[in-house]
Amino acid sequence: MLNKIKELRQELESATAAALDDVEALRLRFISKKGQLSQLFEEFKTVSPEQKRAVGQAINELKTFALEKINLLRESFENRGEQDVHSDLTRPSEPLRLGARHPLSIVRNEIIDIFGHIGFNVAEGPEIEDDWHVFSALNFPPEHPARDMQDTFFIQRSPDVLLRTHTSSVQVRVMEKTPPPIRSIFPGRVYRNEAISARAHCLFHQVEGLLIDENVSFADLKQVLLYFSRELFGEKSEIRLRPSYFPFTEPSAEMDVSCSICGGKGCNICKGTGWLEILGCGMVDPNVLTFCGIDPKKYTGYAFGMGIERIAMLKFGISDIRLFFENDVRFLRQFSGVA
Ligand code: DAH
């Protein structure tokens, strides 16, 4: 019996496989239920007691060797399979999932595009600001509540270093440096010390607009805003201007656009009014022009400012502002292919 085991071992040692089928044949011959090893274990029962130890050990060694050999041969085929994947240049490529632009970027780019068509260029300013550019040059009285610790994140006091609470600060920087005519928009991130909820966040994004030239009137402002609203929300959109107050504009207004969801009939998004408030605007206060070194007797201008989150929420039907900042790919993937 020991001779038979030796022969089988030699057979295994010299075995090769040209294909996976050969490995399977080897497996059937040696380790299947009716294979050589099962037969050996069967014959083992008849071995004399003196030989049992030596024969048993030999069978076990043969079994271990057979399993190793067959596994090795099988693995060599699996590895070869992988190499084939890499070396077959005619194989179609792996499908790549396309990324999605962030909804805030989509809306910001759209706004930049719309104003770009009527000659507005884009400028940016710093997020870390001083009191002059965020408040004083914009005609905020010293005791104005917006300067309060409640709203503003201060980095340092006297001299004040703070996070800008609106992009109107960029108006000041541009007017200080650029002689009129000015026709620009300023997109950017702003910060306010607000409790975070579905409707408010401590950081959000605005786009500010500014036009300074000779003989600019409120009618020019209204027409530009109507053009903008129709480009953004559709050509049937209407706008209305309600008198309001901002320290840096006089007169000031808030603009509503007819609800694009219900077409102005009234729904839960516009709270039944048919109108959605989307921006603040007005004629630049002569004091602001003077502070920024522009002669208010020669020049007039208008400004407007809007929140990008609010517009994106209306456009895409998003009900919670926090979704913009959580970077949950399940949310972000929905904008794949939008722009
Ligand atoms: N800065 C204002 C805000 O953050 C928005 C605004 C209102 C900007 C009127 C303007 C404007 O330029 O004229 O609420």
Image (cartoon, rainbow, N blue to C red):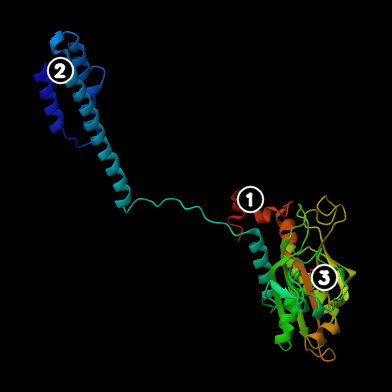
According to the image, label 3 marks what residue? 147
Instruction: Give the side of residue 22 with respect to residue 302, left or right.
Output: left
| Residue 200 image-quadrant placement | bottom right
Question: CA–CA distance between discs 2 and 3?
Answer: 95 Å
Point out residue 172 in the picture as x, y percentages from the top left corner: 75, 80
- Measured as percent of width and height from the top left, residue 47 is found at 15, 10
Graded by Cα atoms within 10 Å as few (under 14), some (14 to 19) or many (20 or more), the crowding at tag 1 reads few
Residue at 86%, 68% in the rendered image: 145
The vertical placement of 170 against 269, above or below, is below
Name the residue tied to disc 1.
331
Quadrant location, ligand no. 1: bottom right
Q: Which of marks 3 and 1 is in front?
A: 3
Residue 336's quadrant in the figure?
bottom right
How many C-alpha atoms fall within 10 Å of the one at disc 2: few (<14), some, or many (≥20)? few
Determine the secondary structure under disc 1. helix
Q: Name the residue under label 2.
A: 54
Q: Which residue occupies the foreground of this view, 156 or 113? A: 156
What label does residue 12 carry, if any? none
Query: What is the distance, in whole Å, between disc 2 and disc 1 at their CAs?
Result: 69 Å
User: In the image, is 337 to the left or to the right of 236?
Assistant: left
> What secondary structure is marked by label 3?
helix
Q: Which amino acid does label 1 sit on?
A: Phe
Say whether marks 3 and 1 touch (CB < 8 Å): no
Tell me the crowding category of disc 3: few under 14, some 14 to 19, or many 20 or more residues within 10 angstroms, Cα based. some
In the rendered view of the protein, which quadrant contains the C terminus?
Answer: bottom right
